[in-house]
Image (spheres, grey):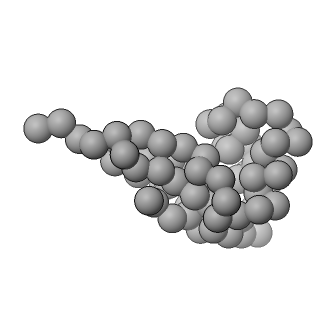
Amino acid sequence: MCESDGFGLIITDVGESRAKVFYIVRQLTAKSPKDVKAILDNPDEVIIASGNKRKIGGIASDLEKVGAKIRII
């Protein structure tokens, strides 16, 4: 059975470890520091990752470990 690739991840709250979340998002998206700052300044607006449930779950776990709150859609 094939897993759906229709999952996305949104950061709803950066938490207290903004620098660590910044680092993870920068690695994940390969965006410029300015673009990552815009993502973190406007939570709930940008899907930072998409893929299958396993991939998104791993990314969500990494972000939650550093204090971010996320929503999987």
Tell me, yes or no, if residue 2 can be seen here.
yes
- Looking at the image, which is closer to me, 50 or 63? 50
Q: Residue drawn 51% across and 64% down?
A: 71
Q: Horizontal and vertical percent for residue 52?
A: 35, 41
Q: Horizontal and vertical percent for residue 31?
A: 75, 33
Q: Residue drawn 55% across and 64% down?
A: 70
Dividing the picture into quadrants, the one containing residue 66 is bottom right
Vertical arrangement, residue 40 with respect to residue 22, above or below? below
Numbered circles on residues, count: 0
Residue at the extreme right: 34
Q: Residue drawn 62% across and 36% down?
A: 28
- Looking at the image, which is closer to me, 16 or 28? 28
Where's the C terminus, which quadrant?
bottom left
Q: Residue drawn 82% across and 34% down?
A: 32
Residue 55 placement, left or right of 67 = left
Q: Horizontal and vertical percent for residue 29?
A: 66, 35
Q: Horizontal and vertical percent for residue 22?
A: 76, 49
Residue at the extreme left: 1
Where's the N terminus, which quadrant?
top left
Residue 29 placement, left or right of 22 = left
Vertical arrangement, residue 70 with respect to residue 63, above or below? below
Vertical arrangement, residue 5 with respect to residue 9, above or below? above
Tell me, yes or no, if residue 54 can be seen here.
no
Residue 11 placement, left or right of 20 = left
